[in-house]
Amino acid sequence: MSSLAEALVEMREDDVLAGVRKEKGAGTPTAATIAELQEGMKTIGDRFESGEYFLSELIMAAEIFKRALDELGLDRSAADTGTRGTVVLGTVHTDIHDIGKNIVASVLSANGFKVVDLGVDVPAQRFVDAVRENDAGVVGLSCLLTTAFAAMQETIDAFRDAGLRDGVTIMIGGGPVTGSLAAKLGADGAGTSAQDAVALAARAVAGGVS
């Protein structure tokens, strides 16, 4: 593991930012620096999966990762290599909460996914259009309000009506979201954390989620 990746894994923000500045000053290719940061994020995700790290560490790491990109003069899209696939992400219609969605977007991009973030209060048809426009294989629907469950159902139904349901993996997330809700709505999976989203997306692109 590189020293930059190790600093990120250990949540040493000052050392991460100093390391990024050092590499930038030395002329290290930006893609190489991002790859080191992504290496750290992968290790953090593995430790979260094993129970060694908790959601607070995952969120903190995503924030440090974002600040490191800022230090490079880049936004999150610079890390969207798309090497692991494309994810269309958004908070469904009737809900405007985005904190959790933004964390998921950062962690997905830090793990090599291209993220198409549609924002909040997103109509069902906009999700469908985005999948077509970006040839995306994974969709993430977010909500915090239980009243938005109907909009999640509407969005999933829109993919079915468009003839795209069999070609896309739909995962749902947010505070009140559960696996049983995913089954009820006809989604392919539910996540309670950003790392859950990464795991579901990874399984989907590997053919592990039907």
Image: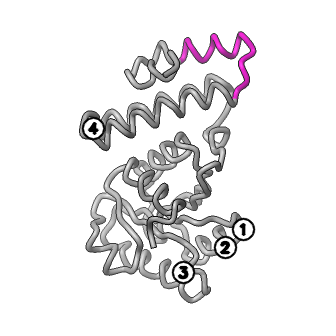
- Residue 148 numbered tag: none
Which residues are the magenta region? 17-30
Residue 147 percent across, percent down from the top left: 33, 73
Q: Residues within 10 Å of mark 4 (few under 14, many from 20)?
A: some
Q: How far apart are marks 4 and 2 (CA)?
A: 35 Å
Residue identifier under label 1? 133
- The CA span between labels 4 and 1 is 36 Å
Magenta span: chief secondary structure:
helix
On whether residue 20 falls in the magenta region, the answer is yes
Task: Using the image, tell me which numbered label, if any, was put on residue 129.
Answer: 2
Q: What amino acid type is highlighted by mark number 3? A: Arg
SS state under label 2:
helix
Q: Does the magenta stretch include residue 65?
A: no
> How many numbered circles does the render carry?
4
Pointer 2 or 3: first along the chain: 2
Q: Which residue bears the numbered disc 3? A: 165
The quarter of the picture where residue 96 lies is bottom left
Of the image marks 1 and 3, the number of the one nearer the N terminus: 1
